[in-house]
Image: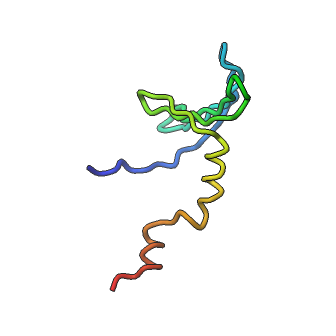
Amino acid sequence: MSMPKAIRPKLSYDRISLRNAGLQMEISATIDGMVYPLLRILADEDDESFWLEVHTGEHHVQIPLEQVRRMIEDAPGTVFSEAQFDRENPAG
């Protein structure tokens, strides 16, 4: 099974107020002139910790925002393209 082609659309974010959900931030992408919500950042009701919410179709998966922040900070020097891997590890 082949992976769908990746796109890099224009992103935007808005603060939204939902009844009984407080103030949240929604990150959206504009694709072919349509705006699609991608992610939400929200605060926990009990301790005000921040969470990144990702919609997977069936589920709303919430990840601690601090964990996401650490992963982003660790990415440079840890994540690289296949071309870079091939340059650093030539076959033969």
Name the residue nearer the viewer: 48 or 77: 48
Count of numbered badges drawn on the protein = 0
Residue 36 position (above or below residue 79): above
Q: Residue at x 73, y 28 (%)?
A: 47
Residue 77, position as x, y percentages in the image:
59, 67
Name the residue nearer the viewer: 26 or 11: 26
Name the residue nearer the viewer: 71 or 39: 71
Residue 59, position as x, y percentages in the image:
45, 28
Q: Is residue 52 left or right of residue 59?
A: right
Q: Residue furthest left?
A: 1
Residue 83 position (above or below residue 56): below
Q: Residue at x 60, y 41 (%)?
A: 11
Residue 61, position as x, y percentages in the image:
51, 33
Q: Residue furthest front?
A: 46
Q: Residue furthest bottom?
A: 92
Q: Residue at x 60, y 53 (%)?
A: 71
Q: What colour scheme does the image use? A: rainbow
Residue 75, position as x, y percentages in the image:
59, 59
Q: Residue at x 33, y 86 (%)?
A: 92
Name the residue nearer the viewer: 7 or 75: 75
